[in-house]
Amino acid sequence: MNKMPNWADTILVPLLSLLLAAVISGVVIALIGHNPIYALKLMVSGALGTSTNFSYTLYYATNFIFTGLAVAVAYHARMFNIGGEGQAYIGGLGAALACLYIPWPHWTLALIGGGLAAAIFGAAWAAIPAYLQAKRGSHIVITTIMFNYMSYPVVNYLLNGPIKAEGMEPATPSFAAEIALPNLSAILGTFGIAFSDRGPANFALVIALLACVGVWILIWRTKLGYETRAFGESESAAKYAGINPTKIIMIAMLISGALAGMMAINNVMGEAERLVLNAVEGAGFIGIAVALMGRNHPLGILIAALLFGILYQGGAELSAELRIPREMVTVIQALVILFTGALDNMVRMPIEKLFLSLRRKEAK
Amino acid sequence: MDLLAFFDIAVLDGTVRLATPLLLACLAGLFSERAGIFDIGLEGKMLISAFLAAAVSFTSGSVWIGMFAGIFASVLLSLLHGLASITFRGNQLISGVAINFFASGITVVAAQSWFGQGGRTPSLSGDARFESIQFPGALTRIRDINKADLPMKVYSELLSGHTIIVYMCILIVPLVWWILYRTRFGLRLRAVGENPGAVDTAGISVVRMRYMAVIICGVLCGMAGAYLSTGLQAGFVREMTAGRGYIALAALIFAKWKPWSALGATLLFGYLQALAIRPDILERAIGIRVQTQVLDALPYILTVIVLAGFVGKAIPPKAGGEPYVKER
């Protein structure tokens, strides 16, 4: 028997965890001498105030959907993939190479080709840690972190040498104008909805939503997803049922890396239209918080990604208006991971007790 | 090619300096993991200590007060990790990741609010820093050292001229070994990481032992962080730990959770880091010019190779990562 109703588990507990994270973030903001309520108002208006601002929020949310899904897919196989940052960066490299060196006749083909390249590069960057985990038992957490650190010098080298554009800046040349993805205002415009065309939100949002559906089907409606979840629940039971652990670890991590890599559709192909240094901007790490908050379910991830999009865009406003550094978002992200992940039982146990005592009263 | 250049005194001197924070962090992880608590959060604890040690040293003018402030902050994060992973039986990896992000963010936010210099502390000098200790008769000017003969070079550059924390580290390895293998506390600590049920049956509190372990871990991480900002460098800059916490973890696995091997492993990683900042010496040694980015990636590549188990199988403490549930 469940200790508490389903809605409490999926909605009440994460909401309370979030509230705790928000309160402590407020305390931090108060400690550095600002009014937390004013800061909150500033963040909300900065993120949702105008349709340009909202476009930025959606743009960030798109990044976080990809990286959040990446963490979630691995997590269902009980693999903790902290390497989303590096996988997304290398995925960006794949997208950039495909867009620079293949003359795509139309943006739809570039989207498929570039997206595929991004996915393959991201998956490749996850493949070695996955193999080492599956075959040699090397801890995936540490190896994926090491691969994050390795991705920076790799891209750094390429952007300063072989694929550098003319000029001072370490970046690739801009992609051809014909393969630019349509931005959100153009897409919404075809439905007669007015939306700011000055923001960065673009067609990648559609791909991200499709990815949510895809992951849901994969995890809950396919044999592979079933095997993955079985493996995640109990490795020994899964082995006994004839599920091959190496196969599950490899496939889950490759899909995870591919999803992280596909973030490049948004930030590299959709927005910058070239590859720059530090293109991922920590989105890979935010994916961890998004997946935890979203309970590793695509719908939850969608909501959590939107929330972090608001936080991220609102955080930009904070740094512009109040000169609170962008790293404040990292603090909030850490608190969300702490309360929804590590201290989950702290929030959960009192609520479970509450529901049990309520139920006992009913029984009397 | 000049293979002797690999043993350049300046590189070996750098090895000692750079291995020190790795060793302290590695031993910190050793205490925690031997007691059955995985700790990904070494990085974050070092970082917060590096910041607070530099900030308080600058404000108070005393590096010792600064170091204690750093250790205090690091222990606080340790206790948070303990709360999540011991008391509330949460996921130890997730807790560690949260601690790392928290430290990464809060140090910059606090540094900006405190000093307003874009997330760094002002440069430290004088008593606000650990001064290097010169041995009697040691040469101090680089020009003199370059002219001296080998024994004098070794004495002046490699042995002399380090900060007190480096010299303390020489004592700390035998001390940790003695605590771990020759005291009752050490026996219980190891037992709690292998078979907490047995320790519990013997009437010893598993929770208390594990909290002791994470507190020791916090103290050592605090020392490592304080050394980074007040000994190795003169002030805090954002993300100054640069993955050292993770490299220390890799060294711990490489060392198979043993103190003397930890010394060897951290010296190896320290050597690689020292070589990475001297591309000229590497070029002299192997005769080929190496891209700086290769050197940047080298410690991490080596860590993966080590983790891949090409150096023999590493068996972690049996109860590592598992929360202990008493009423079973």
Image (tube, rainbow, N blue to C red):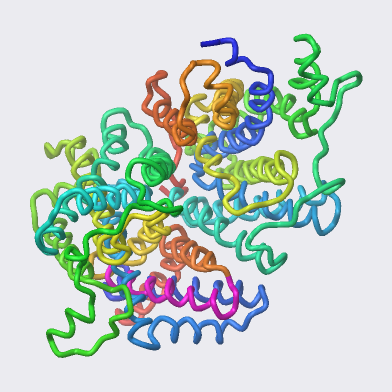
Q: Quadrant of the N terminus of chain A?
A: bottom left
Closer to us: A222 or A123: A123
- Residue B191 visible here: yes
Residue found at x 53% / y 77%: A318
Q: Give residue A291's position: percent from left, percent from top.
A: 33, 61
Query: In front here: A362 or A364?
Result: A362
Point out the residue furthest to the right here. Answer: B136
Residue B100 lies within the magenta run: no
B101 relative to A102 in the view: left or right: right
Does residue B139 appear to the left or right of A94 in the view shown? right
Q: Who's the residue at 35% across and 51% down the image?
A: A165
Q: Work out which residue is located at the far front of the displayed protein and give it.
A: A166
Could you tell me residue B87's position as x and y percent?
Answer: 52, 55
Query: Is there any visible trace of residue A9 in the rendered image?
Result: no
Which corner quadrant of the image does residue B114 belong to?
bottom right
Toward the viewer: B73 or A258? A258
Q: Which residues are magenta?
A: A301-324
Q: Main secondary structure of the magenta part?
A: helix
Residue at (72%, 65%) from the top-left corner? Answer: B115
Is the residue A216 above or below the residue B255 in the image?
Answer: below
Give the residue at x 50% y 73%.
A20
Report x, y in % for residue B14: 66, 27
Residue A282 falls in image quadrant: bottom left
**Front residue of this view, candidates B166 and A238:** B166
Instruction: Name the quarter where the C terminus of chain A is drawn.
Output: bottom left
In this picture, residue B136 sits left or right of residue A206: right
Q: Is residue A315 magenta?
A: yes
